[in-house]
Image (cartoon, grey):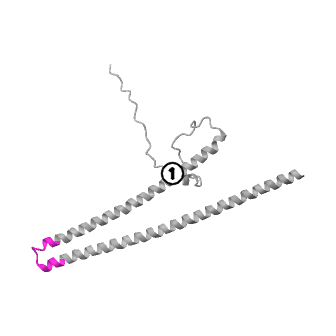
Amino acid sequence: MKPKDTTPPPPNREPKRKLSLQSAMAAATSDGSVVVKPLMNPLGEFPNMRDSDLPEMEARLLEIQADIINREELIVEREKKLEFREREVNEREALIEARRNVMDTQDSGTSESSKEHNAKELSALEKLKKELDAQEKSIKEAREVLKEREQYIEKCENDLVEKSMLLTEREARIEQKEDDYKTFTTACNSEA
């Protein structure tokens, strides 16, 4: 007798989903028409959770959420930097190709008449000049955009620090008033 092949069938796997906290938050805060399927079954994850642990866990989850959002923003920023570098590399390759064309026209000029040689050389040089001008213009525009962006970020940071300081001062004044009120009420109660 032959032994039966008892290997289990392959599992039915769902395609991997890209995790994004921002999209999950948007789906969770939507009108409810979208059903959000959890990645794991949360039942039994925290069997002996106390009510006193809940605020700590919520605070930790908020920290993790903020950290994930920051990391996603860093990834987007790095992708933009990589695109910029790729564009620069492509521009440099175009320049090298144009220079090769100029050199090729100079080398092939010995077999052609001088007028044809000069015409080819001039057209290659004009093409190279146009590419250089276009690159220079795009670099200037990119630098201007970057400069404006940096100024905007600096302004926002300064506004944020200023508002933070105002809120801290306001909080200190409110706390002082609360302390004064408590002192006043205890003094009034002790006199009465």
Can residue 127 be seen in this snapshot? yes
| Residue 19 in the image: above or below residue 115 | above
View extreme (bottom): residue: 115
Residue 43: name its quadrant.
Answer: top right
- Judging depth in this view, the residue of 33 and 101 nearest the camera is 101
- Magenta stretch containing residue 7, yes or no? no
- Magenta stretch containing residue 109, yes or no? yes
- The image shows residue 143 at horizontal and vertical percentages of 41, 69
The residue indicated by pointer 1 is: 68
Residue 175: name its quadrant.
Answer: bottom right
- Judging depth in this view, the residue of 169 and 78 nearest the camera is 169
87 relative position to 105: left or right:
right
Query: Count the marks: how many?
Result: 1
| Residue 56 in the image: above or below residue 178 | above
Disc 1 residue type (three-letter) = Ile
Q: Residues within 10 Å of mark 1 (few under 14, many from 20)?
A: some
View extreme (top): residue: 1
7 relative position to 150: left or right:
left
Query: Disc 1 on helix, strand or loop?
Result: helix
> What secondary structure characterizes most of the magenta part?
helix
- Judging depth in this view, the residue of 100 and 161 nearest the camera is 161
Residue 82: name its quadrant.
Answer: bottom left
- Judging depth in this view, the residue of 115 and 12 nearest the camera is 115
Can residue 35 be seen in this snapshot? no
Residue stretch rendered in magenta on the structure: 105-119
Q: Residue at x 66, y 41 (%)?
A: 52
- The image shows residue 56 at horizontal and vertical percentages of 62, 44
Q: Residue at x 24, y 69 (%)?
A: 98
